[in-house]
Image: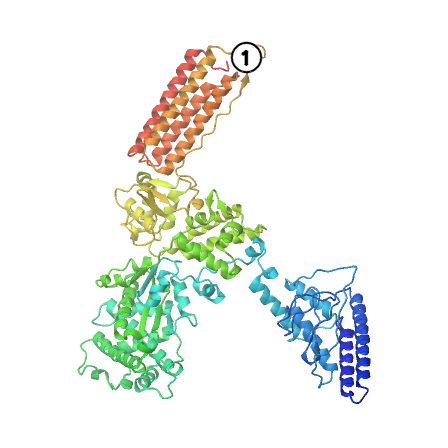
């Protein structure tokens, strides 16, 4: 038999169907009952023969044929029998369906079997056969090799099942085999391996938090599925705010790209992203008689007017479905053609060239009934700038009339003009600032010129917006919206993106308890992660992705604590480099400032920072003479605080900022490096405080089996006194540290921990003395005194010598000197140590 294992089964079914049809046509006269009885017997014999032949065929192929349980929606039948040896459902029209062991009914492989069965049955059954009668076929399973009823869960298993079913007969290209492979691939992409998430391993394989940039993230589809609606997004869509301001990576472009997606905003959107060529044209644009800000606002207004006109011409036909365009719309179409702004002119640069030429000379305004530039306003303009402004007013009036004639403001949502990626063409020079200021003025103007039919949304980086200084800046405060992210918001964003990639059934508890470890370093995992990333989505996405990638590279089925710690170091190095690149235009010296914080504590006092800056100030002034005025100790503090590298202690909190918060005040003296950058700098502790290591001592066992106190004499009593004096000194230092409320809390905790280590070492030495061992108490005390002297010097270098921190340093120095004197007097007066 060629083909699948059931060829004989299908052949028997077709033969039986033809015989049954023949008998039914011959049912006439008194022999009908006899013929009916004979037909039933024949049917029984035919079914048994078919079952025997089907069983033999199945056994020859390894017993692969069996009946599976379930129903097959794809085949259109009722529930298939689930017991081996039971008959298989026969569909209308004599279409027999065979279910295969290893395939769930309704799966892609079962559908392939059904198609083959139907094709073979149709080729053998008469065309007039429409009865539900058909061969009841059952394929027996080999008794020696029982196989479970399991669903095909992977593409590889599906392919193996097809090979078992088809043998050497393959589906031609574009038919069942191709559909099976594509359907299996879709199944794996949508449900993952196995069609369900049975454990962390499958989730980690599918887990992905998206791209770092919104443009690629939208093309991959994760931004659309995993987008998190925030207050900033709602304010932008509702029209309450026009300026969306945020740091790099804060989600500005994500909002912009989401609005441009099909079906998100019903009123239509137009995205404007200037490139270098377009930015250069805007920066160089000038008009006689106008300031740089005003002149550049005119070129932006021209871009907005042309974009709105192009939208109206297309919009009137596609949305309003007007067979005949109104007069204002026709006028806009003629204007676009006359000025080279036809619909097939795609580039912003070309549009700017037309606008620059037209505004500096004259625009063709005949479409609006104006035949020459002198007709605008009735008198020749006094200057080039005035003439350009009057021409532009004519164009804007024509656009407004077209909006009003179509009733766009009342019939649907407004057209959104989205301006993004200005940082690509901004370079911190006066012309660049004038370009951005002109954009702000133009956006505010068109909001009044076109009413509710058009709105502008500007997406600006905070470092660009905060450098602008113009007379009308106070008029934009109510239009500003600064994007601020909290740890809670980032946590919700992470879960939304995890569900978009791994499946909607993934819960937050499972993500942070099973996929990720419950805790890292004794801290809740989510708090650990989002506390060590700058509060913006891009950083969170990068951090989470590198944790996942580290786990996969190390072959872990879930993300382990060690994976997170290893990824933290890599992420910190990335962010330190990215911070310098982010502010390369405004603060090109930033990377040189990071050297002052290498391998130091993350708590930095003002006096220590000033001392460190003095060592590099001359070099910085020589390398960056244009910034020498701001390269002072207070200026460096303001810069590092403004970019988010340093935080300042205010009350019981440490405040980090990257936006327009209260600047550092002169009386604020305690600063903290952001946790994001500490691993890359080696700033693992609050201050650079050496760890106390107990002195390696050689203990002589003086215990006597007959008289335990035989070795105890005056030297041992001096050893007791020395160690007890060391314990008293440690207690005195601890009390002073507890009272030093002006000392940074992290420094107090670190210092107290080291003093406890000294005390514990002294207590263990005392215990050994009481047990009869000989201990070098003199060495213990001198080692502790030397350690306290070093700690005092390190505290002074860290800048804690002011306020109550200075009292701690003085107390440590005093105790170190007293211990040294005590040990020296005891050693000389006692005639030796306990080792003598």
The picture places residue 71, in percent across and down from the top left corner, at 64, 69
Callout 1: SS: loop
- The residue labelled by disc 1 is 708
**Please, is residue 477 above or below residue 39 in the view?**
above
Q: Observer-nearest residue: 33 or 77?
A: 33
Q: Is residue 137 left or right of residue 308?
A: right
**Mark 1, other Cα within 10 Å: few <14 / some 14–19 / many ≥20:** few
Q: Observer-nearest residue: 16 or 719?
A: 16
Residue at (51% x, 22% y) in the render: 697
Q: Is residue 187 left or right of residue 297?
A: right
Residue 56 picture quarter: bottom right
Q: How is the image coloured?
A: rainbow
From this viewpoint, is residue 216 visible?
no
Q: Is residue 263 left or right of residue 57?
A: left
Q: Is residue 422 left or right of residue 209?
A: left
Residue at (62% x, 71% y) in the render: 73
The picture places residue 354, in percent across and down from the top left corner, at 33, 77
Q: Residue furthest front?
A: 30
Q: Residue furthest bottom?
A: 29
Q: Observer-nearest residue: 820 or 428?
A: 820
């Amino acid at each position: 038999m060629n083909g699948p294992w059931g060829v004989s089964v299908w052949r028997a079914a077709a033969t039986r169907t033809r015989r049954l049809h023949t008998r039914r046509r011959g049912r006439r006269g008194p022999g009908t009952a006899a013929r009916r009885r004979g037909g039933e017997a024949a049917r029984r014999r035919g079914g048994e023969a078919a079952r025997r032949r089907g069983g033999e065929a199945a056994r020859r192929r390894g017993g692969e044929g069996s009946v599976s349980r379930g129903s097959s929606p794809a085949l259109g039948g009722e529930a298939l029998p689930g017991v081996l040896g039971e008959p298989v459902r026969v569909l209308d029209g004599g279409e027999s369906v065979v279910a295969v062991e290893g395939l769930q009914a309704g799966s892609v492989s079962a559908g392939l079997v059904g198609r083959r069965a139907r094709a073979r049955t149709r080729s053998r059954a008469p065309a007039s056969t429409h009865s539900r009668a058909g061969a009841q076929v059952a394929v027996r399973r080999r008794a020696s090799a029982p196989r479970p009823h399991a669903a095909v869960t992977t593409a590889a298993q599906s392919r193996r099942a097809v090979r078992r079913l088809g043998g050497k007969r393959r589906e031609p290209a574009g038919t069942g085999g191709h559909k099976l492979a594509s359907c299996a691939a879709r199944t794996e992409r949508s449900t993952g391996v196995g069609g369900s998430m049975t454990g962390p391993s499958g989730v980690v394989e599918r887990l992905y938090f998206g791209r770092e940039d919104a443009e690629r993230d939208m093309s991959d589809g994760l931004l659309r599925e995993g987008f998190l609606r925030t207050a900033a997004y709602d304010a932008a869509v509702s029209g309450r705010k026009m300026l969306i301001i945020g740091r790099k990576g804060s989600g500005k472009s994500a909002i912009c790209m989401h609005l441009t997606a099909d079906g998100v905003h019903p009123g239509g959107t137009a995205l404007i992203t200037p490139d270098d060529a377009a930015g250069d044209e805007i920066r160089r644009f000038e008009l006689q008689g106008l300031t740089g800000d005003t002149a550049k606002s005119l070129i932006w207004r021209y871009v907005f007017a042309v974009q709105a006109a192009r939208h109206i011409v297309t919009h009137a036909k596609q949305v309003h479905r007007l067979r005949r365009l109104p007069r204002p719309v026709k006028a806009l179409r003629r204007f676009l053609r006359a000025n080279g702004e036809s619909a097939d002119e795609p580039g912003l640069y070309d549009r700017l060239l037309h606008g620059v030429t037209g505004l500096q000379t004259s625009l063709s305004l005949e479409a609006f009934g104006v035949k020459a530039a002198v007709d605008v306003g009735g008198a020749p303009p006094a200057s080039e700038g005035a003439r350009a402004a009057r021409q532009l007013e004519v164009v804007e009036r024509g656009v407004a009339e077209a909006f009003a004639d179509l009733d766009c403001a009342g019939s649907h949502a407004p057209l959104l003009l989205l301006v993004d990626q200005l940082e690509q063409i901004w370079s911190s020079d006066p012309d660049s600032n004038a370009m951005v200021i002109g954009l702000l003025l133009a956006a505010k103007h068109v909001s009044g010129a076109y009413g509710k039919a058009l709105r502008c949304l500007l997406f600006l980086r905070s470092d660009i917006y905060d450098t602008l200084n113009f007379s009308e800046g106070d008029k934009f405060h109510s239009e500003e919206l600064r994007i601020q992210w909290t740890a809670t918001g980032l946590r919700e964003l992470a879960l939304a993106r995890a569900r978009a990639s791994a499946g909607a059934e993934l819960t937050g508890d499972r993500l942070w308890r099973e996929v990720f470890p419950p805790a890292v370093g004794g801290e809740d995992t989510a708090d650990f992660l989002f506390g060590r990333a700058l509060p913006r989505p891009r950083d969170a996405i990068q951090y989470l992705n590198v944790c996942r990638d580290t786990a996969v590279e190390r072959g872990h089925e879930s993300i382990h604590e060690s994976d997170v710690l290893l990824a933290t170091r890599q992420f910190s190095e990335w962010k330190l480099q990215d911070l310098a690149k982010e502010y390369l235009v405004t603060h090109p010296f930033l990377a040189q400032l990071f050297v002052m914080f290498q391998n130091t504590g993350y708590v930095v006092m003002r006096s220590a920072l000033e001392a460190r800056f003095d060592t590099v100030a001359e070099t910085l002034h020589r390398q960056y003479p244009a910034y020498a005025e701001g390269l002072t100790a207070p200026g460096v503090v303001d810069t590092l605080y403004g970019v988010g590298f340093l935080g300042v202690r205010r009350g019981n909190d440490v405040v980090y900022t990257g936006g327009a918060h209260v600047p550092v005040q002169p009386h604020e003296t305690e600063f903290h490096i952001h946790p994001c950058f500490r691993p890359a700098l080696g700033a693992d502790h609050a201050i650079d405080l050496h760890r106390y290591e107990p002195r390696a001592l050689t203990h002589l066992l003086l215990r006597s089996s007959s008289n335990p106190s035989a070795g105890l004499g005056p030297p041992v009593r001096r050893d007791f006194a020395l160690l007890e004096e060391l314990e008293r000194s440690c207690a005195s230092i601890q009390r002073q540290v507890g009272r030093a409320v002006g000392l940074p809390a992290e420094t107090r905790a670190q210092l107290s921990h080291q003093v406890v280590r000294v005390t514990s070492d002294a207590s263990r030495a005392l215990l050994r003395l009481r047990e009869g061992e000989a201990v070098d108490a003199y060495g213990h005390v001198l080692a502790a005194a030397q350690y306290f002297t070093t700690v005092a010097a390190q505290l002074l270098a860290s800048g804690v010598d002011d306020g109550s921190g200075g009292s701690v340093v003085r107390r440590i120095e005093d105790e170190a000197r007293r211990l040294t004197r005590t040990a020296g007097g005891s050693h000389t007066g006692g005639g030796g140590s306990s080792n003598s």
